[in-house]
Image (spheres, rainbow, N blue to C red):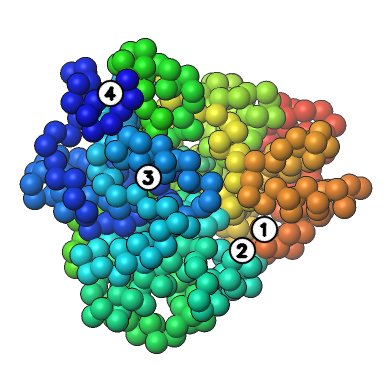
Amino acid sequence: MFLNKETVTTLPAAVITGKGRNRGAGSIVHFGVGGFHRSHQAWAIQQLIGLDPALNSTWNICGVCIMPQDKIFVEKMKKQDLLYSLRICASGEKEEVMVIDAITELLFGPEETEKVISRIADANTSLVTFTITEGGYNIDEATGEFDLKHVDIQHDLQSGNLPKTVFGYLAAGLKQRYVNGGAPLTLLSCDNIQGNGDVLKLALYSFVRAYHPALIEYLDKQVAFPNSMVDRITPVTQPADRASLLEKYGYEDECLVVCEPFFQWVIEKHTAPGFPPLEQAGVDLVSDVRAYESMKLRILNGGHSLTGLIGKAMGYNYIHDAITDKNISTLFDLYNEKEVHLSLEALPGVDYKVYANQVKHRFGNAMINDSTDRIISGSTAKIPKFVLPVINWQIANGIRPVTGALIVAAWWFYLDTQVINGGMINDPAAEEWSSLFKTHADNTLAAFLDRQDVFGDLSLSEPFRDQVADFAVSIRKHDMLYACAQAIKSLV
Ligand code: CS2
């Protein structure tokens, strides 16, 4: 039995379903309907609607997928009448399964371009949200600027072309919205980037200045770009997860999402009128979100990169196994206590040590079966946001970076090994890395660290380069375990 609007009424009582909701269009448009959006924002909206279905169904979500490869997913969701299950797994055997019905419309951009544009333009839409990945904002790390020369951006700037990028869709929608009367709007980024709202604003303003400068005045006056911190570990769903759903609950779901019970969403109060009352669903609305962002990006996401990259080099395929390795676990603690915490501003009411311990405990959750491969994927966009800020802070304060340099060396080792063995690099920048490493086969490390568009000013920092080189030599001459022990020794 497949999940759809008929079968959902016959599911076993253990599956939580949202009964009797209004499935009409809502006021939220969301770009990027991957697993994370479905376990995090859609779950929060589901909670909100559940509190008062008659009133809150106005917050239903219109999902938008713009990548050609999303077509299969859109078709699967449509076959299920846009319903999907979320399996929330706590450590141990406890789990909760619920059917989420907060997404009431799903558009495939390449085939429904006009619909996407009119949804953004519609005055009933008061919030547009984004999970477009860390690299999706098209910012050059060397200059901190939006890359207007990118071929897809150039394509989207030509009038008459159907958009390919989120900025093309957004600008076209905003242009029409402005013509329709210019209703206020909140644009909310839900990606793991420090100052994600500011980054979205910078990117959109750069695009709009080249596309239709008259829109800037509307953006200035009516559009808000709050920063936000998002958190819920959501691994890639495996065939075994779907098989276990069928076995335990008797139905099939091609769009199942698995996640941990932990949920956090902190949003800056700077929003336009018509923002959902998310505080009722456990979301924190604060005046300044920066310190929450740094905490989460540096401790959790940076800790993930540590565990994933170092773990993979030691032969671990899963995060929960890697984090129980004595050396990785010790280094995780030392990295936090001796390096990361010093780089963070104090956050009233938050003890970073307690937070880091909780993160470590979450990493140990075997029920979600998160892979080191998922963490390693897309490191080109992740490392500059998760790990380099700590190193930059250390270099600026005359402190020698240890663990961060080892994480960077582990990343180089991953790329180098994949190129040598002809393996696949799991990264949108895979091609660039593989041709760079092949051209500079005599010294791949120097070529790697020379990439200022990735490492920014660190690319020119001798202490940083020396430290990474030291670890790289240890890894190649001995192994990752040796390099890890070396890092631990210099931190205790
Ligand atoms: C992970 C994140 O992709 C990564 O490297 O660190 O996806 C992480 O699981 C989420 O940000 C958790 O909120």
Q: Residues within 10 Å of mark 3 (few under 14, many from 20)?
A: many
Given the image, on which type of amino acid does mark 2 rest? Answer: Glu
Which mark sits nearer the N-terminus, 3 or 2? 3
Residue type at tag 1? Phe
In the displayed structure, 322 sits above or below 36; it is: above
Residue bearing the label numbered 4: 96
To which residue does mark 2 refer?
A: 141
The residue under label 1 is 455
The relative height of residue 248 versus residue 331 in the rendered view (above or below) is above
Query: Given this view, does label 3 or label 2 mark the residue nearer the observer?
Result: 3
> Can you say which quadrant of the picture contains the N terminus?
top left
Relative placement, left or right, of 122 versus 260 is: left
Cβ of mark 1 under 8 Å from ligand 1: the answer is: no
- Of the residues under marks 1 and 4, which one precedes in the sequence? 4
Instruction: Please state which of residues 24 and 17 is positioned toward the viewer in this rendering.
Output: 24
- Residue 252, percent across and down? 36, 23
Which is more N-terminal, label 3 or label 4? 3
- Which residue occupies 39% across, 87% down? 214
Q: Mark 2 or mark 1, which has the lower sequence index?
A: 2
Tell me the residue at 68%/36% (across/down): 487
* Picture quadrant of residue 449: bottom right
Give the CA separation, mark 1 to mark 4: 42 Å
Residue 261, can we see it? no
Residue 37 disc label: 3
**Lower position in the chain sequence, tag 2 or tag 4:** 4
**Picture quarter containing residue 147?**
bottom right
Instruction: Check mark 3 vs ligand 1: CB closer than 8 Å? yes or no.
Output: no
Farthest residue in the bottom direction?
Answer: 214
